[in-house]
Amino acid sequence: MRLRTRLALTIALLAFLPNLVLVLLLGRPSGGLFLWLLLVALLSGGIGYLLAQGLLRPLTELTRAVTYLSLKEGPLHELRLPPPKEPPPQEIALLRARFEELLERVRRLLEEREAYYGALAHDLKTPLLSALRALEYLEGADAIGKEARVALLKEIKEELARGYRLVENLLALSRLEAHPLSPETLNLRALVEDLLLRYRKEADRRGLALWAEGAGSARGERILLERALANLLENALRHAKGRVRVRVEEGALTVEDDGEGLPLPLEALAQPFRQGQGNRGSSGLGLYTAKRVAEAHGGRLSAGKSPLGGAALRLELRPGNRM
């Protein structure tokens, strides 16, 4: 039943019931009283309908405005609720204000997403374009020699690896948004050792000592935790002078290096697609992804000073003995 009908019936009953009670108290009703009751019923129904129309007019106007808004074509930032024809009651005015706040929030989210995708396209285009140009040069460079060719291939590999890391982080973020976590109890030391095997060659190439200490477990999704830890390891390997250590605890992982430390607070460095000097991650997306993964697991990403002399990034999770 529509709200207008309910309201009209309520008003009509409030007007009709006192007359009905009065007739019943007078004794046996006559034909004239029946006619009187019928007239009162009709008048009560009409008055109820008219009052319901008037009371619900501001709500009806707001409904039409929202319908107009949903059907109107054009950019989102140009969408506005039409002004009311007359000052609405306080409750309707509050409802309009809350709806406009929601619309403004949607605008901001879409603007942020547009900026996000724009930065993503730029950051993904840069390594791909560099690799393509290097390949075009390599295609016609028959006399550059083996050493120059190897250096050029190394540059291509680094650019493609940069693009690959960017895509990996985007996939992790997409998984966080699109799917609920599928946590399991993980042996953190085993997870770290498996990951260190992937980065051992890179550490040797840079002349860095890379090792793990401690033991512990945590509840989490393995793929996401591996991506978060890989981001922290890549940052540490990029900025360390000689040593990188991963400390394993119950429900926590800490990646330490002996570099210069974080140039800015973690909150600033963990902004996605942050530009400028001092960005330790790939476009800022590495630390941002690690932060989001930690929060999705009921933990957090924090930064401190490492006993090795550089930065210590701690990934706190839910301990493995907690369900």
Image (cartoon, helix red, strand yellow):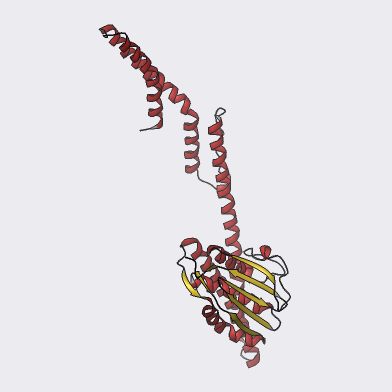
Q: Residue at x 25, y 7 (%)?
A: 31
In front here: 129 or 66? 66
Residue 13 x %, y %: 37, 21
In front here: 162 or 94? 94
Specify whether 260 is left or right of 273. right
Residue 195 x %, y %: 54, 80
Residue 222 vertical position relative to residue 29 in the rendered view, above or below: below
Residue 197 vertical position relative to residue 61 in the rendered view, above or below: below
Specify whether 140 is left or right of 218. right
Q: Residue at x 33, y 12 (%)?
A: 39
**Looking at the image, which residue sits at the far front?**
321
Specify whether 276 is left or right of 316. right
Residue 213 x %, y %: 60, 81
Instruction: Report the number of numbered marks.
Output: 0
Residue 90 can be seen, yes or no: yes
Q: Quadrant of the N terminus?
A: top left
In front here: 116 or 172? 172
Quadrant of the rendered structure where residue 295 is?
A: bottom right
Residue 161 x %, y %: 58, 78
Quadrant of the rendered structure where residue 257 is?
A: bottom right
Residue 136 can be seen, yes or no: no
Residue 72 vertical position relative to residue 259 in the rendered view, above or below: above
Residue 292 vertical position relative to residue 83 in the rendered view, above or below: below
